[in-house]
Image: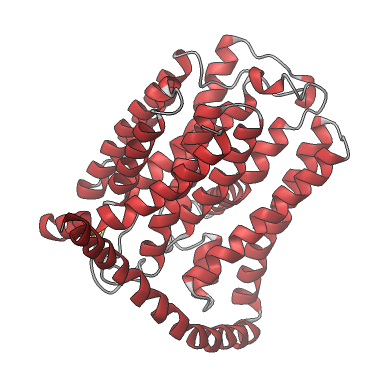
């Protein structure tokens, strides 16, 4: 089968599996108490099921099993094993709140195991700062640090409806297309399986009322693991074969990680400056600031995705102009600071020193929110009828 066609079928199949599987998990979560309950930091007014990670992992597993009939995916065995491991830890954390040091240790263990497997490791900086190949010790330390950082960065942005899943769709499309172009077919199939599963999940997470489900730690951890695997794939020496003079790989990886990575760095620095732990929960993330300013969750998701897309666009310009690894990386980092940090600092400044202007803009956003509420309600009715439609079609087929 044509590889591009296979990837498109993978997206469609994974997306269609979500409405068929999700209602059953929602019912189970409600009966067994796997729910996220309202508190001072959360906007929901009723308990919402948090088994999204299990649904996503199940759909990805089924999709890969079907795709394996057409292309050899044996190379993904260890990655899928670690995916299940992190999913289970996330599910336990959603149920009983595992201490963050235990979660950190398990994340280090997973990344280290992937490293010593011989494939998922960061072995080169692609010429950045004159560094090409890394020795085993440095490579191990860098891989563990980057892996744990990425997993937690993805976990940090899972704060409003739809954001983590939409960011996952965005990264999956970018990396999946890159992998397809470079002949990394197993990772391309994995990427597009994530795209389909997360795209289907996004609509239920962002719009559904009857079947609403959160990704939970189980979902954010497996998404973070996929992003780390993607970084390793992009930075692997094999990917440099056809691009040996371009040196774009580091800046490319930074560009599509700009939103979660730079927002996490800013938030952690902000908390440390206030004398608090970098893991202290608050509402200082950029997505929280925009929601508190009166913008709807979905609107915030697309605004942030657009900002990240601008960073990727600037990377593409630098790569097309043939700039060296250093200047590509510096321009991408500068763009991420401008598009991710500056809006957050601007909102904080208005809230602290220009409160009247902040409130005026807030009222405009609230009025805009009211105008779009009807569209949101229409989408909610449409999404909530999708599982019923699948059940009806299944019954008709049996008859």
Position of residue 209 measured from the top left corner of the image (x, y, whole percent): 30, 72
Q: Please report the residue visible at 69 percent of the width from the left and 38 percent of the height from the top.
A: 252
Q: Nearer the viewer, residue 376 or 88?
A: 376
Residue 178 horizontal side relative to residue 367, left or right = right
Residue 302 horizontal side relative to residue 387, left or right = right
Q: Please report the residue visible at 29 percent of the width from the left and 67 percent of the height from the top.
A: 39
Q: Residue furthest left?
A: 31
Looking at the image, residue 82 lies above or below residue 220: above
Looking at the image, residue 285 lies above or below residue 62: below
Position of residue 17 measured from the top left corner of the image (x, y, whole percent): 33, 50
Regarding residue 197, the answer to whether it shows in the image is no
Position of residue 318 measured from the top left corner of the image (x, y, whole percent): 83, 42
Quarter location, residue 54: top left
Q: Please report the residue visible at 78 percent of the width from the left and 49 percent of the height from the top.
A: 314
Q: Which residue lies furthest to the front in this view?
A: 399
What colour-coding does the image apply? secondary structure
Position of residue 53 measured from the top left corner of the image (x, y, whole percent): 32, 47
Position of the C terminus, as image quadrant, is: bottom left
Regarding residue 376, the answer to whether it shows in the image is yes
Quarter location, residue 383: bottom left
Looking at the image, residue 26 lies above or below residue 268: below
Count of numbered labels shown in the rendering: 0
């Amino acid at each position: 089968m044509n590889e591009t066609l296979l990837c498109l079928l993978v997206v469609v199949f994974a997306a269609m599996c979500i409405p068929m599987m999700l209602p059953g998990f929602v019912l189970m979560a409600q009966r067994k108490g796997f729910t996220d309950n309202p508190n001072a930091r959360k906007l929901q007014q009723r308990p919402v099921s948090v088994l999204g990670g299990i649904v996503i992992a199940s759909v990805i597993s089924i999709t890969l099993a079907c795709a394996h009939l057409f292309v050899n995916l044996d190379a993904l065995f260890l990655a899928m094993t670690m995916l299940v491991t992190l999913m289970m830890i996330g599910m336990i954390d959603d149920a009983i709140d595992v201490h963050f040091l235990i979660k950190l240790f398990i994340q280090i263990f997973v990344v280290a195991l992937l490293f010593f497997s011989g494939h998922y490791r960061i072995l080169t900086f692609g010429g950045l700062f004159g560094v090409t190949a890394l020795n085993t010790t440095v490579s191990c330390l860098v891989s563990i640090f980057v892996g744990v950082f990425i997993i937690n960065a993805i976990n940090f942005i899972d704060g409003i409806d739809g954001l983590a899943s939409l960011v996952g769709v965005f990264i999956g499309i970018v990396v999946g297309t890159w992998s397809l172009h470079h002949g990394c077919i197993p990772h391309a199939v994995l990427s597009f399986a994530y795209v389909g599963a997360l795209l289907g999940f996004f609509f239920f997470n962002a719009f559904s009322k009857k079947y609403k489900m959160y990704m939970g730690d189980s979902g954010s951890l497996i998404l973070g693991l996929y992003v780390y695997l993607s970084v390793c794939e992009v930075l692997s020496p094999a990917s440099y074969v056809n691009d040996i003079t371009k040196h774009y790989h580091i800046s490319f990886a930074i560009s599509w990680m700009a939103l979660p990575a730079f927002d996490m760095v800013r938030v952690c620095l902000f908390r440390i400056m206030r004398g608090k732990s970098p893991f202290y929960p608050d509402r200082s993330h950029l997505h929280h600031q925009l929601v508190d300013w009166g913008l709807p969750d979905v609107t915030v998701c697309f605004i942030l995705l657009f900002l990240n897309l601008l960073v990727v666009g600037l990377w593409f310009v630098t790569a097309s102009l043939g700039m060296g690894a250093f200047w590509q990386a510096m321009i991408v980092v500068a763009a991420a600071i401008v598009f991710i940090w500056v809006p957050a600092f601007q909102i904080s400044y208005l809230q602290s020193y220009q409160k009247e202007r902040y409130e005026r803009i807030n009222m405009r956003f609230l009025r805009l929110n009211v105008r779009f509420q009807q569209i949101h309600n229409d989408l909610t009715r449409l999404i909530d009828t999708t599982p019923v439609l699948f059940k009806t079609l299944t019954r008709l087929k049996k008859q």
